[in-house]
Amino acid sequence: MGVLTSIAPAWMLKRMAIAKRERTHSSIDTLTKCCPRFAENWDTQQHSGLDEETWFRWIAALANAGFQKDALTFSKGSRKHNEQSERRIEELTSGNHGPTRCKSMGCGDDQMRQCFGNELSKNEAGELTHSPAAFLQRKLTKRKPEQEPLFNDLPEGYAIENGLLCEMVYYKENVKAVPISNFLAVPTKTIVKDNGQEKQRFYQIEGIIPRTGKRLPAILVPDSQFAAMQWPSGWGLEPNLFPGPTVKDKARYVFQHLGQHAVEESVFTHIGWKEINGSSCYLHANGCIGATNVKVELEDRLSKYKLPTSPGDRVKASQASLALLELAPLRITLPLFAFMYLAPLRKWLEEASLPPALLLWVYGRTGARKSSISALYLCHYGTFTAKNLPASFKDTANSIEKLASDCRDCVLLVDDYHPNNNPVDAKKMEQIAQQLVRGYGDLQGRNRMNADGSLRITNVPRGLCLITAEDMISGSSSNSRLFPVEVLPGDVDLDKLTQAQKDSKLLSQAMVGYLEWLGQEMQEQDIESLTEFLHEKRNEASRLDVHGRLVEAATMLYTGLHYALKYALSIGAITHERHDQILTEGWELFLDIANEQGEQVVEVKPTTRFLSIVSQLLANKSIHTVNVKQQEPDGVSLSGAHVGWHDKEFYYFLPDPLYNVVSQFLSRQEERFPITKQMLWRQLADEGFTQIEIEGKQKRYTKKKSIGRFRDRTLWVKVSALRGAEERLTARARREQATSPEMEALFAPEDGEQAPET
């Protein structure tokens, strides 16, 4: 028999060219006239309301038969109907439930015979199995099920027989219907998901059970899984394939044939710039800036990256963005401001072979409002608060890596890098931080392999990253890849912060205006001009004797600030004088921070760290050396481990004991030395801290030394090197003390007294 056209989905009617049959009555009218049990219950429902069990049976019967609207009408017939009733009906509609049987309604065999006549069916136990759904299908169609035409769109050699998809096998003069499945599936749409690196194809498949006419909701199947035919399990147990070695192939052939006219739809799964119809358009969770009818689907954690459809009052919005510079000292607000406007420039900077490779590290004590001010700045890209940020260090490394790839040409905020008493959690957090810093600093991801040995697409960071933290990360290499912003208690003006949070919607409007302007600006400006601008500022910054990465970071932040202010000036949101003032202050500030961070990088270099630790251990007498001209007095033991000798020019350290002592010192702090002993000796020599020995063509980083009866190789460290390490350590301590609010309060002059000179 054919499928019941009166309850077939619209797509199936179109596919199979069956004439549309209109229902002349609703299911409630039909059941009232033809089913005494329903008529009685419907009357009770309208007057006093049914008990919950009977109400649920009829609701389930109507919903499962495909009459969801009538189920809602039936429920609303009583004053007992409420929001919970609607939720339960919705659950029935979205779920997969079998038909409610007439027997459950209280009907006996005699009543069912009156309703169904000779069209009775029984199960293996001899029980009548009819349901209100089958009764409705019979009454609401002009033809009986066995009179329905076969599907016109089925491939040759296949048909619907007795409600089953069958292969028509010809044997001599007879035709035999061999069952394949009790359901039909039609791919109605091909969806191509584009993440900016690769495209994945999915099929949207809808289905129907021909025997009952029950619709099967749309499911999404990856193209790689379509042929395996495992996906019908997504509809539950009711859709079923018959057994047989070739059944899956035959079902796949039929279903794929039915989907030959499926429409194709493109869906983007990332944020950022995309070339659409020859124009640069900016994708976000709410659609696209610069194009219409563009579909975007993002991870749930990125759903807050929603931009408005219009920039609104451009001047007002831009001025609200500029007003954020007054929330705190410029050393905090200027880097954050520039960072937000730098991110959309990444596309063109990458085309100029100068992609921004930096990470903003906003750190400070708990309660300093670092997360609040960072979240407010992120509102340039959507609606965020300190409690609903897109990522945190509680997330897994893989999930953050995926977000970093999808957040293209915008800022990903990862919140709350903090000290942890649990060594395992602390190590995990450190690993994630190192991975982020190196990922954004080197613009590289982790390579992985597929099951077949081929390489997967690597999730490379494609935007910028802002991290909020309570401390700096360890390692000189890591510190050179980030740009630090320290937030001290009292830095953030809370009144201005509260007002800015109320007006935060203006920030996303400002970004929409900037993106529209930037797309046009970059279309008119050639890449060579941008490259010349960057090289000019980088050469100007290179006068600083600091790590090259920090010079690059200062240049990139200035670039973001330059274009943000250029846009504000173009729409009249800022005066020329204020424009020039902020640019000048920003450039000087970025260079100062880069210079100071460069000093920090030097202090945490392995060689500098090693010399500083040795200097401290000597000072507190945890280790000791003996003057080469003096013998240790008999019966007198010096404190600490003996690690070598010294004179006016050199310390002659025993290499292994010294390295072991430093390693043990770090181990007690749950750290380890970042490089091997051999590499450490080489770097000390390369930086001029130790004396080397050359034998022929071989360079040796230890030298022979004879002291009394001792004659062996020692590490010759210059006395000036250890003294310099001690001076750097003392200077750093003074700086930290000078910037400590507690120390400032402790040593502040009282009652008008003058502070002593230092």
Image: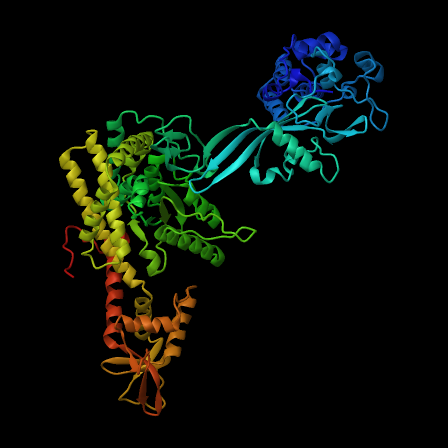
**Closest to the observer: 434 or 512?**
512
Question: Residue farthest to the right?
Answer: 126
Q: In screen coordinates, is 461 left or right of 725?
A: right
**Closest to the observer: 501 or 427?**
427
**Quadrant of image for the N terminus:** top right
The spot of residue 735 in percent (x, y) is 24, 58
Residue 5 lies, with reference to residue 366, above or below; the image says above
Is the image coloured rainbow, by chain, by secondary structure, or in one colour? rainbow
Q: In screen coordinates, is 89 left or right of 430?
A: right
The spot of residue 144 in percent (x, y) is 74, 14
Q: Residue at x 21, y 46 (%)?
A: 532
**Closest to the observer: 492 or 608?**
608
The spot of residue 608 in percent (x, y) is 30, 67
Count of number-bearing discs:
0
Instruction: Please tell me in which quadrant of the rendered image residue 618 appears.
Output: bottom left
Please indicate, yes or no, whether residue 616 appears anywhere in the rendered image: no
**Quadrant of image for the C terminus:** bottom left
The spot of residue 66 in percent (x, y) is 65, 20
**Closest to the observer: 293 or 745?**
293
Instruction: Please tell me in which quadrant of the rendered image residue 609 appears.
Output: bottom left
Q: In screen coordinates, is 56 left or right of 355?
A: right
Q: In screen coordinates, is 383 left or right of 494?
A: right
Please indicate, yes or no, whether residue 752 appears anywhere in the rendered image: yes
Residue 753 lies, with reference to residue 381, above or below; the image says below
Q: Residue at x 39, y 78 (%)?
A: 656
